[in-house]
Image (cartoon, helix red, strand yellow):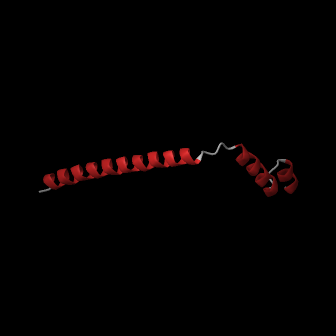
Amino acid sequence: MTESKEKSGSSPVKFIEEVRNEMRKVSWPTKKELTSYTGVVGLAVVIVCALIWVCDTIFARLFRALLR
């Protein structure tokens, strides 16, 4: 059983080596790009939160009016 695992390349050491090799290939963003992306994500979160709040308010008033 252990021989087949080692032959297939599933040893933990080999896995770590492969992960390190793949991480070297990653194209990391610059500080400017990272700041820009963070701003875009923050803005998107604010917009989605506002949209959910508006929908929640509308539905709450609608159900309150229907249940009176």
Residue 56 picture location, percent across and down? 27, 52
Percent from the top left, x then y, of residue 38?
49, 49
Side of 49 where 63 appears, left or right:
left
Q: Which residue is most to the front?
A: 32
Front residue of this view, candidates 15 and 64: 15
Residue furthest to the left: 68
Front-most of residues 49 and 66: 49
Horizontal side, residue 25 vs residue 2: left or right: left
The quarter of the picture where the C terminus appears is bottom left
Q: Residue at x 85, y 56 (%)?
A: 2
Which quadrant of the rendered structure holds the N terminus?
bottom right
Horizontal and vertical percent position of residue 45: 40, 50
Left/right placement of residue 59 relative to residue 12 reads left
Q: Nearer the viewer, residue 36 or 48?
A: 36
> Residue at position x 63%, y 45% from top?
28
- Residue at 22% x, 49% y: name it: 58
Q: Residue at x 71, y 48 (%)?
A: 23
Q: How many marks?
A: 0
- 25 left or right, relative to 13: left
